[in-house]
Amino acid sequence: MIAITMLFMVSSTVAAESLTTVSAGTLPPLPGNVAPEELLSIDGRTVALGKGQAWALRADNKAWELLTGKIDATVHGAIAAGGRAYLLEGSAAGTSDRLQPLQLQKNHLKKGSAVPLPLALTSTHATVLGDTLYLSGNDDTGATRLYSRSLAASATSAWQPQPVWPQTGTPSALQAQKGRLYAVVGGSQQNDQLWRWSTEDGWQSMPPLQGKLIDGSMRALG
Amino acid sequence: MLVKTPGGKIQARTFHSITSAWNTLEDAPAIAAPQAITSWGNGLLWASTGAGGSQFQYAQIESSKHLLRWLDWAVIIVYLAAMLGIGAWFYFQEKHGSTSDFFVGGRSIPFWAAGISLYATNTSSISFIAIPAKAFETNWQYMTNNLIAVLGLMFVAIWIVPLLRRLDLMSVFSYLETRFHPTIRMLASGLCIVMQIGSRMSVILFLPALAISTITGIDVVWSILLMGVFTIIYTTMGGMKAVIWTDFVQVFVMFGGAIFAIGFIIQQINGGMPEFLSTAMAENKTQLFDFSFDLTKATVWGFIFLVVFDVVLTFPKDQVLMQRVLSTKSDKEAGRSIWTFAAMMIPGGFVFYGIGTALWVYYKNNPERLNPLLPIDATFPLFIAAELPMGVTGLIIAGIFAAAMSTLSSIINSVSTLASVDFYERLKKNPTPKQSVRFAEWIGVLVGLIAIGIALVMSRYDIHSLFDVSIELAGLLGGGFAGAYTLGMFTRRANWQGVAIGVAGSILITLIFWSMSLVHPYFYLAISILLCIVIGYLASLFFPPPAASLKGLTIYKQDTA
């Protein structure tokens, strides 16, 4: 203990050096300066969707390559998790009614069989937790719904309704990480609310965001 | 995630899922109204429309390394030199003319030193890093294991240790020969050697090296070589006495660093001890006991089950721990060494779990000091490298080295003892004590080098799944022999034929369970021990009772030596 005390006395305290840095950069625009409507990662490649077409970023990050295969529906969101990629597709009025699985085969965007949603939803978000896909959104009465669907089972697997966080409002995000689900719920309030679900505790409110979540920006790290 | 503040500014923020704290990334670039967003490495890629059309921007978090400074290195070098000094001192003092000197310290070790050495051996660097991480992530429920283990160790001290100590063994597997058959001894000893070299030593070297490397940038290879080579030298030079007395010093280095760390963390918390206690207790971070009957949780009942099979019934065959007990002066001192070990487990538990909880409160109050990219196991090493004063960082890294080296030196000494006593002395006709000791020294060097080699391979290639399988297999193969001790000590009817059938049957059935994944790996050891006891006892009934005297070999009074 004497040695420790002495060490403490002779040593200088650590300057609060930064533990992390943020590196930033830019990428080239899409050919023809098309404004992308969705961005997602498929099979490890970054893909941009816009005007019914799709481009994949080249490995050297210096150019976008046009993919064969068209996106001919209205896309309301993209999900990429656990090596899987889906588009939330539906009507132009903002209602989603199906999940469109996507695969990338070289420079061809291949669509799988679309999975109908249990009902038409607005403000739809989805995430994958283990082998289960979770889907949230508001129904035509404005009530929030949460469903799960096993990805491991056959295509006949059904959507299962799940308990929803105890707050009314528009879901802004749904994200899975380390066995838990996170949902951000917006509304008329100034701050969005974060909710966390686990098998042990159910839905629990977390500290609010102190602002409004930018749609599509919630990601799991670590 | 990106958040638009009430003032209209877009900020990049992280939410830490364990401390439930938000942090704003102040050095993120300016972000203007993203239209589409996706993942980009450890960050985000977004598209927005500017004056020149659509633009793609990305931002991602990168970790910084915290290089050790001169005083840290000085402390580590002093520590390593001291370990070599202890080894050299015993080498020149003792000369190791007898096997008893080299393997069991001439049976002259005081109980308190043996007890502290037991604690040091049992506390590897994995616990130094993993226990604070567990308390950081959850609460103190896993410390229930320490508390129940104390009760288990009491049973060991009263019933098992005096019996084995009175037999004056050097290899615990000698008991199996005396009680049953030489073949059972050789098989059990051989399996123990393979398990220690193949699955335990290399992990003890590799995991702390990886954790230190993640934070400080010290190359994994250098950490492995430093710990491994120094341990080989002082262990083979100084024999058992050097192992026990370096363990003694290492416990002080380990505890000194850990106690300083917990004090320092609490001092850094805004509000000090009252804030630490109130925040931790409000969030149930100090919750200890779970009496529920939920099989999926860390309950008191689960830990009782674990302690009975993993501590009590396997203790007699644990050469690494038992060798300390056998080094004491008498059976009374042997029992006391276990009491000392048990007594240290409780404060030890509170210190290491306390560090994890203190870290949780600290990082909840200072979310900007947490690196979201690091795994949970790196939380304590991160704090050591980034927050502690110069010199103390070196002391605690020396503590992590100490935890690894104390376990490693004990294993090297035990494996060389087993190789010499159970094999060399049996296969070579009438070796001199000097030859036995020299053989053990070379085996010590060899097993140390093999462990370093495997650890280096682990640092280069991803062989973890292969490794996990080898650990599972070793565990389920070893269970049968633990059952043999139970049959030998607690029954008078068990004979060598029955025990051989019990060991073989338990291994076979458990292997079938394992190959078909019938139960959770957690249960293999218990199943294996139980099967050996049941099959071994029933099979013994088909053969005559043991013909030789059982005097001193069972716990029963009529057999007491």
Image (spheres, coloured by chain):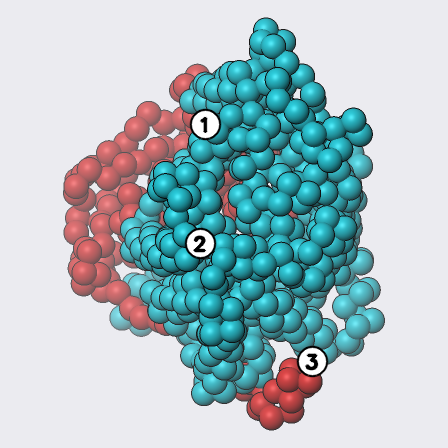
Chain colours: A red, B cyan
Give the left or right position of residue A106, taking residue A1 as reference.
left
Kindly identify the amino acid type of the residue bearing the numbered disc 1.
Thr
- Give the mark toward the camera: 2 or 3: 2
Front of the two marks 1 and 3: 1
Q: Residue B67's spot in the image, x, y percent? A: 43, 79
Q: Residues within 10 Å of mark 1 (few under 14, many from 20)?
A: few
Q: Is residue B355 visible?
A: yes
At label 2, the amino acid type is Pro
Query: Which residue corresponds to mark 3?
Result: A1
Residue B297 image point, x, y percent: 68, 37
Amino acid at circle 3: Met
Front in this rendered view, residue B81 or B392: B81
Asked if residue B82 is positioned above or below residue B421 in the image, the reply reads below
Between residues B82 and A141, which one lies in front from this camera angle?
A: B82
Question: Does B243 sit above or below residue A54?
Answer: below
| Comes first in the chain, label 2 or label 1 | 1
Chain of the residue displaying label 1? B
Q: Which mark is residue B433?
A: 2
Helix, strand or loop for disc 2:
helix
- For disc 3, the chain is A
Circles 1 and 3: CB atoms closer than 8 Å: no
Mark 2 touches mark 1? (CB < 8 Å): no
- On the image, numbered disc 1 is attached to which residue? B183
B259 sits left or right of B61 in the view: right
